[in-house]
Image (spheres, helix red, strand yellow):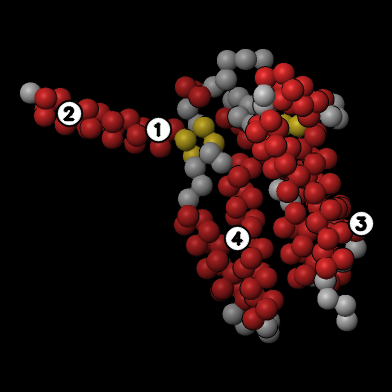
Amino acid sequence: MSRKIASSSRIDGSVFEKEMKLQVLDFQLWYVAAVLLAYLVFSRKRDWGWRKRLLHVALLLYLCALIKVTFFPIPIAEEFAVQDDPSRFYSFVPFYSTMLLVHGAMQIHWAGTLIRLVGGNFVLLMPLAVLVPMIWKGSQSLLRITVTGLVISCSIEALQFLIGAAIGWPYRFVDVDDVMLNTAGCMVAYGGFVLLRPRT
């Protein structure tokens, strides 16, 4: 009797897992394979050295990771809808959400959350600020890298907002502080790149 119950439980669990996978759109590894394959087809007749090709692949892999971290998973079932005021998921006042996190860290020991969110946003676009000027020499200026980081960060927040509007609820927190931290991280990373790059 117990064996039948255990078997039934496993079957029910597997069905539930399949349903959950159908209700959540997640990032798949074949997306990365498709991107790399497209790059190989596009670049096969290009006269690029191995170093530049490695930098291209590194940038593509980073962009895939960036898309996964910032947009996925995307809930597409009503069971995931947030029963709350949608405006609470948008913050357009500079430093407001960061100060709330700092206050929470001081009051109820959210230090780990504070480091993960603030630090994570600070380092998010740092690889971009190093890879882009290594690939395209014309982008080697603080202004160009800052604008690039700002545009990409704003695009991420805007797409998160639009995806939330498309599925019917805000699934990510859209925050101006994220943009400022992303952009500041870009500037710091580019500064480090300038200081550490070999002099010719």
Mark 4 lies on residue: 61
Residue 38 in sight in this render: yes
As drawn, the label of residue 20 is 1
What amino acid does circle 4 point to?
Leu
- Mark 3–mark 2 Cα distance, whole angstroms, equals 62 Å
- Point out which mark residue 6 bears: 2
- Crowd rating for badge 1 (residues with CA inside 10 Å; few <14, some 14–19, many 20+): few
Q: Nearer the viewer, mark 4 or mark 2?
A: 2
Lower position in the chain sequence, tag 4 or tag 2:
2
Mark 1 element type: helix
Label 2 neighbour load within 10 Å: few <14, some 14-19, many 20+: few
Instruction: Please state if 134 lies on the left or on the right of 56 as rendered.
Output: right
Q: Is residue 161 visible?
A: no
Q: Nearer the viewer, mark 1 or mark 2?
A: 2
For label 3, the residue is 143
Q: Earlier in the sequence, mark 1 or mark 2?
A: 2
